[in-house]
Image: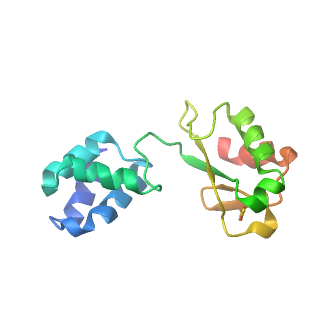
Amino acid sequence: MKDGLSVILKKYGKDKSQLVSILQDIQAEYNYLPREALEKLSKKMDIPQSHVYSMATFFRAFSLNKRGKHIVNVCLGTACHVRGGELILESLERQLGVGRGQTTPDLKFTLESVNCMGCCATGPVVKIGEEYFGHMTNDKVEPMLKKYRE
Ligand code: FES
């Protein structure tokens, strides 16, 4: 863990204007922002911890909690909602055994929701990592998850 962080911190030197980019790199490395990494970043770059945390909590893309290897996003925007997005979310909650915003104990999946993915015509839509699944139905949930479970 520490090696990846050292490489990131070295890359940016003491350039405080790059704080968001550094946080993005840390999140990309660990899939979330570990407390230990933020403390080290604060110390190394001489940025108050309160400022680091305010940036880390301001952007929705950042997470201070451990996240799964695969981020499952269910769209609950209007177009997807009227086509059954909530039912797909419930089905995912049952299949994964966690609620929205939670991560499975094996750290494989984190279940989240978004308000629109920009592909409303194919709703309801689920996204796992960078892969989109349109026209979702309850029957498609388990086969969709299968390849990510391995
Ligand atoms: S509302 Fe779901 S993609 Fe736009």
Residue in the image at 73% along x and 43% along y:
89
Q: Quadrant of residue 100?
A: top right
Q: Nearer the viewer, residue 115 or 32?
A: 115
Q: Identify the image quadrant of residue 87.
A: top right
Front residue of this view, candidates 44 and 48: 48
The percent position of residue 83, horizontal first and vertical second, equals 84, 56
Residue 5 coordinates in the image, percent (x, y): 27, 52
Any part of residue 150 in sight: no
- In the image, taking residue 138 as reference, residue 133 lies left or right, namely left
Q: Is residue 9 left or right of residue 98?
A: left
Residue at screen point 31% across, 52% down: 54
Q: Residue at x 49, y 42 (%)?
A: 67
Q: Residue at x 45, y 49 (%)?
A: 31
**Where is the C terminus found, in terms of image quarters?**
top right
Task: Look at the picture and state if 99 lies above or below 136.
Answer: above
Res. 111 visible in picture? yes
The image position of residue 98, as x and y in percent, is 63, 32
